[in-house]
Amino acid sequence: MRQAEFLWLDGALPDQQVRSKSRVLVVDESASFDPAAYPEWGYDGSSTYQASGHDSDLVLRPVRVVRDPFRGGDDRLVLCEVFTPDGTPHATNTRARLREVLDAGGAKQEPWVGFEQEYTLFAGERPLGFPVDGTEPRPQGPFYCGVGADRIFGRDFVEAHTRACIDAGLMIYGINAEVMPGQWEFQIGYRGIAGESPDVLNVADQLVIARWLLRRVGEEFGVEPRLDPKPVKGDWNGAGNHTNFSTAAMRSRATGLGAIRDAIERLAARHDAHIAGYGHGLADRLTGLHETCSIHEFRSGVADRGASIRIPRSVEIEGAGYLEDRRPGANCDPYTVCALLLETVCLTDRKAVSA
């Protein structure tokens, strides 16, 4: 017998949340990481903003399995897609759209992705590190990658979340304190480890699981990790989900920089479509200040953190690598971000496969 926590994205607007429920079942150890070894399971979609009460049955279909870092042992976390009873992907199932784009030709260029997920820890309505009397802390500057009780807030939570990601077997790359007190970042994606695949579907799945782990660890510490792209108004950095993207042509020294420049031209032509799919509340974050480019402008540059698309200096030197899309907000849907990148960069007709 093992316990499996089934995870899925709900229909909450404007930002979907990860829901979960647990099932006790028998799955042979040799197949315990195979999604096909786990049964489909129903749930009440009317309680997750995905159905009406008079016709509320929806179906969870397992698609990714990792270790459960909380229960340990033989127990697993099982990420699922949501389907209607007739087998149609539910309207909120954005993972199905990404699969569709991959099948339509997006996979041919061997796209890889990595996410730099920023988030802010809150105690009630106050970010950790902000004075309890409601006054402003000292200006940003000493907090980014800082150390010390006067600069760093929530490290015990962050270390617990990092350990949970490692124990689950996720491709977590690193962590760092961000520019605002109580704000942190973790990275998920390519690590150069044999047997790990940074393909877009795998990494997007892992980010969704890592976000569930954020909130689950928050239960243990009594804090709320928020993905608000502008958690505090005023002269403070917002929170993004910078997306590092590449194709086989970008990673090849024979074609690298040329392929990257071509991708940037394509991205410039569909800037508005990407902004529309990169997360709710982007206008508050993409102001042209605080290491962002204005939401109304598209600009690229080498080592330029004020650009829409940054080419890392190391990529320019090597002549190959990846580009960093700095526009997605912390609350973006990783499946939608990846689908848009594939539609724009990898599909020859440059047209969206689905609405």
Image: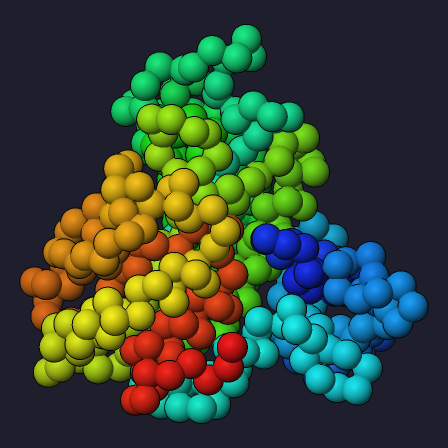
Q: Residue reaching furthest top?
A: 133
Front position in the image: 49 or 217: 49
Does 155 appear above or below 36?
Answer: above
Q: Residue 98's x, y, as percent? A: 50, 77
Quick check: 242 left or right of 7? left
Query: Residue 85 sits in which quadrant?
Result: bottom right
- For the question of whether residue 242 can be seen, the reply is yes
Quadrant in which the N terminus appears = bottom right
Residue at 30%, 59% (x, y): give it.
325
Front position in the image: 144 or 65: 144
Residue at 50%, 72% (x, y): give it.
202
Query: Residue 208 sits in which quadrant?
Result: bottom right
Does 234 appear above or below 44?
Answer: above
Query: Residue 140 sits in which quadrant?
Result: top left
Q: Residue 125's x, y, as percent? A: 60, 26
Q: Residue reaching furthest right?
A: 54
